Amino acid sequence: METPLTEHIHPDKPPLDIDAYRKVGGYAALDQALRMAPEDIIRQVEEAHLRGRGGAGFPTGRKWSFIPKGPDAVHPKYIVVNADEMEPATFKDRVLLEGNPHQLIEGIVIAACAVQADIGYVFLRQAYRRAERRLRRALAEAYHEGWLGRDIQGSGFSFDLHLHVSAGRYICGEETALISALEGRRPVPRAKPPFPPVAGLWGKPTVVNNVETLCNVPHILRKGPEWFRGLSRCGDGGTKIYGASGRVQRPGAWELPMGTPMREIFEDRAGGMAEGYRFRGVIPGGGSTDFLVEAHLDTPMDFDSIQKAGSRMGTGCILVLDDRTCPVGMVLNLMRFFAQESCGWCTPCREGLPWIVRLLEAIECGQGIAADLEQLRRHAELLAPGHTFCALAPGAVEPLSSALHYFEADFERHIRQHRCPWS
Amino acid sequence: MLTAEEIEEIKAEYPRYEQRQAVSVEALKVVQRHRGWVSDEALADVACLLEMDVAELDAVATFYNLIYRKPVGRHVILVCNSVSCWVMGGETIRECLEARLGIRLGETTPDGRFTLLPVVCLGACHQAPAMMIDDDLHHHLDPAKIDAILETYQ
């Protein structure tokens, strides 16, 4: 089984420096891209069926194709790399940022060639200090060796790449909030349309891509779209960095074919439940995805299959709910997170999420009443897509409404017994 | 008044962005690196330098949880309170830290050594529970390890 993204990542060793990276074939794909027509790069990425790894799964090549091109296009054009990984239970981009920063840089510059961008920013969360140190070193090496900056490798193509280290707040990972943050404004999301490819950073055409997405790009160019599609077990190309946390035997992250069934991740990689714990459910792709249960374990972990099962693959990092953890408490923890991280811009999210928290707190401490469950369901409906300014609140209520569905009896027991049965 | 060193570090960021305001987060962090936190006075000085409205810069500063608008201790402990750590006993770690330090979340020890703050998911979920002290990530925490870890931060 091929693992192109993590082949050269060894958790206990520092990442490859530029010489070592070159020796294993690094920057060869960029060298090729510098001599390709931009539309050919985009076509290869489209044919590879690469979908964005930030959570939404938008086809990467199509996103790039929205960028205005040709002599009349507005410049500068920007590439923004979303390295603001803060989705609860998600730790996949950290692996790539710390493990092989040159792979990411190469992917970014290839993307820049494809959309003819002039300037790029890696938007990194502050907590990833080790990633920051390693990226800074890699950026300096790439500049020194002429893979960044003016007239890259004598191709006539110039591209500058900067590291922007942020200062917290989950909402900065929302692409338009991220753009506001980069401009030095209060980072609240913006109305769409216009979408960033048309009017993004400082109103200029801007591509926002996730770290893992861009790390795939050099491999697509080196080995071709057909090879890339062949890595996968479903219609979407490539591998995926999956993760598992919670009370499992071996929590961790693994690069596996896209579309690997959840059971293989949970049982074969994570080793199943830790001693003394039983499986009850799983959040498949970060805190803003619906719970799934045992009946779903054989579902392939890809965007379409998980959606058909009633959730979202999101970031592909699964969090397991065990029998000794209170589902109401777990949902309360998630809702506190989202209520706190709401930017406060739109009323349904700013007011609705704290209301949900208060209802759940009452239930968890034994003061809930039967009508609270209906009230919670009503809130979940009111915060559904289309009612809020951005995707934060609709994502937030996914684990809530699915928990009310799958663990309804547990909510009812809290209300009936006037206490948390797990406390 | 910003020091010459602070001004120099802030100005070094200008060429990286199309507009000066974009430097605001980095400028606040420069001040924080030198002083530990961002006072009203320092904020007004940064706003002046960046040709921003004070209220607008404060709206940026107060949005970010890692820009400190109050004094903090010599070391800042960020203890994860997100869901993977919560499942793995993160609350016990928080309680243990509060008991050892004699402070609650959001407070600073009387000797000014530690400030204890909650933080969202640190992306160390497979090594939960986790916390950061200054620039260091500590993971696989259990109450028995806490004293030894704290001891290394004087």
Image (cartoon, rainbow, N blue to C red):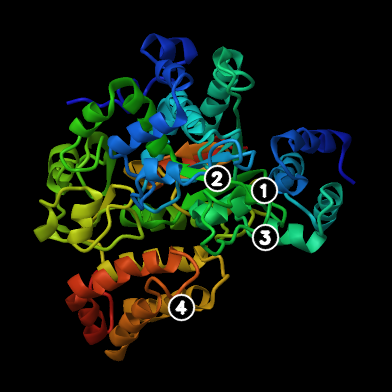
Host chain of mark 2: A
Q: Residue at x 31, y 81 (%)?
A: A377
Mark pair 2, 4: CA separation: 32 Å
Position of the C terminus of chain B by quadrant: top right
> Which residue in the protein does label 2 denote?
A206
Mark pair 4, 1: CA separation: 35 Å
In this rendering, position of residue A288 left or right of residue A192: left
In this rendering, position of residue A257 left or right of residue B32: left
Q: Give yes or no for contact between labels 2 and 4 (Cβ–Cβ under 8 Å).
A: no
Q: Residue at x 17, y 45 (%)?
A: A266
Mark pair 1, 2: CA separation: 40 Å
Res B146 seen here: no
| Disc 4 versus disc 1: nearer the observer | 4
> Which residue in the protein does label 4 denote?
A352
Mark pair 3, 4: CA separation: 22 Å
- Give the number of the disc on residue B73: 1
| 3 and 1 marks on the same chain | yes
Rendered image quadrant of residue B29: top right
- Residue count near mark 2 (Cα–Cα under 10 Å), binned few <14, some 14–19, many ≥20: many
| Amino acid type shown at disc 1 | Gly
- Residue count near mark 4 (Cα–Cα under 10 Å), binned few <14, some 14–19, many ≥20: some
Mark pair 3, 1: CA separation: 19 Å
Rendered image quadrant of residue A124: top right
Q: Where residue A10 sits: x, y (%)?
A: 34, 22
Host chain of mark 3: B
Residue B46 or B130: which is nearer the viewer? B46
| Amino acid type shown at disc 3 | Thr
Q: Secondary structure at mark 2?
A: strand
Q: Residue at x 45, y 74 (%)?
A: A353
Q: Earlier in the sequence, mark 3 or mark 1?
A: 3
Residue A290 or A143: which is nearer the viewer? A143
> Which residue in the protein does label 3 denote?
B62
